[in-house]
Amino acid sequence: MIDFTGKKFGLISLGCDKNRVDSEKALAIISSRGGVITNDAEDAQILIINTCAFLNEARKEAIETVLEYAAYKSKNLEKLVVTGCLPQKFVGETFPALTEADVFLGTNDYDKLFEALEKSYESGRVNFVGTGDGSCVINRVVTTPLHYAYLKIADGCNNRCTYCLIPKIRGRYQSYPIEKLLEEVEALGDVSELILVAQDVTRYGVDLYGQKKLVDFLRKVTTCGNINSVRLLYCYPDMIDDELIAEIRDNPKIIKYIDIPLQHSEDVILKLMNRPAGREKYLKLIEKLRNEIPDIAIRSTFIAGFPTESEESFEGLCSFIRQAKLNNCGFFAYSREPDTAAFKLKGQLPYCVKKKRVKKLYEIQREISRETLEKLVGSSVKVVCDGIDYGRGCFVGRAYFQAPEIDGKVYFNAPSAEQGKYYKVIINGTDGYDLFGRTEDYCNE
């Protein structure tokens, strides 16, 4: 049996924040076995690459990353481990082709990491995909700035959107037990901002308890003394009900922010996507949220260039964006993914058309964002400090309407500021995406 105590482990996490949580749990498993975690890949003896496979571009990035770091075997690197979504879905293709990697693990196989490594040290390359039990790991080595953390409350998806590979990669929706999640939250220590994530957080509990339990969980997690605030990402539109809206409105610890991936606005396209509701229901939902929670920030994502998307459908989407006036949006060109229902649809559009449409959508949203942010110039905004931007020579943080990594930031000058603390920042400008300002006690003389 190999003694891994003192072995230096590195980990590179690709893809989404849900992948990041998996990576953090893997690091905790490594630490529990006496492994030493290093941030320097050149120093690592065992390097783990946690991959994304949602889109072809993500798969390409994953393979290129493996090939890049395989070169480190001429230095200290002894074993290269590939885990996550890429081997989970495509191990049949990647294991025989990606010979630079020594160990392959899937999304639920982290409990088999050391067994797989031992086998690899003994007999060479090994495929352990599908051998783990997917047990809920409580401990994590948090890789975000210490004042905020993600909490993955469920895995998998039942929605079966025709463009999406997630159900084929992650399987059916699986909620984690409330008591286990609360243990995980307690182990995180003091957190200014806890960000709830899942493929669909609003469906939480349906599989495990027979009914939606997100509101119950929100009430429990916001009573935890170590949690200052909670942010909601990835709320499926048809699952947002009056109870959830009231909880966001009335619970002072819940940030008045919601991410609702709408993906399109036009009924004909939404039907082909196997998405719920439609344009008018979406607009009514947005109106209801704003009526019930006047200051709520709403974020969404949209796909441009889905098969059969005509000029009329695209202009309808542009019109919807102008009418909805959401705080933040992400726009993506449709990616034709094998093993999805949309792959077989007729009316596939050229890549250049899809990219042109994405560009136009961003131009529309940029003007909406600029108009929204310019209204804040001259006002005082509560900002959490995320750290220092040395390139700009100032502090950087976020207001409540800005989630980490996906929305804009607030750059501000202050005599001093501490990461994770909140400051009142007087806004004196915007570039249409970020805000710029200073604290009241800052004097530029």
Image (tube, grey):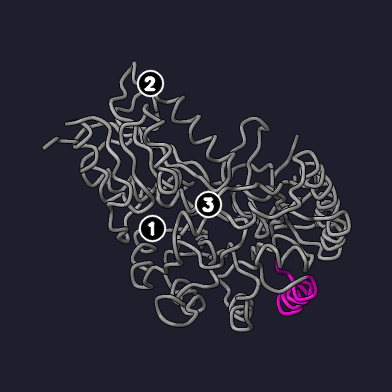
Residue 314's image quarter?
A: bottom right
Evaluate if marks 2 and 3 touch, with contact meaning CB atoms under 8 Å apart: no
Q: Nearer the viewer, residue 123 or 152?
A: 123
* Magenta-drawn stretch contains 282: yes
Residue at which label 1 appears? 189
Viewer-side residue, 310 vs 372: 310
* Structural distance between the alpha carbons of marks 1 and 2: 35 Å
**Which amino acid, by three-letter code, is at mark 2?**
Tyr
On-image quarter of the C terminus: top right
Task: Please tell me which of labels 1 and 3 falls first in the chain.
Answer: 1
Q: Earlier in the sequence, mark 2 or mark 3?
A: 2
Q: Which residues are magenta?
A: 279-296
Q: The disc labelled 3 sits on which kind of residue?
A: Gly
Drawn side of residue 329 relative to residue 105, left or right: right
The location of residue 361, given as percent across then percent down, is 81, 50
The residue pinned by badge 3 equals 420
Res. 440 in view: no
Residue in the image at 80% along x and 75% along y: 280
User: Residue 355: horizontal and vertical position, in percent?
Assistant: 77, 41
In the displayed structure image, the side of residue 300 where residue 104 appears, left or right? left
Residue extending furthest toward the top? 74
Crowd around label 1: few <14 · some 14–19 · many ≥20 (10 Å): few
The N terminus appears in which quarter of the rendering?
Answer: top left
Question: Circle 2 is placed at which residue position?
Answer: 72
Give the side of residue 50 with respect to residue 3, left or right. Answer: right
**Which residue shows up at 62% across the image and 60% down it?**
162
Q: Closer to the observer: label 1 or label 2?
A: 2
- SS of the residue at dot 2? helix
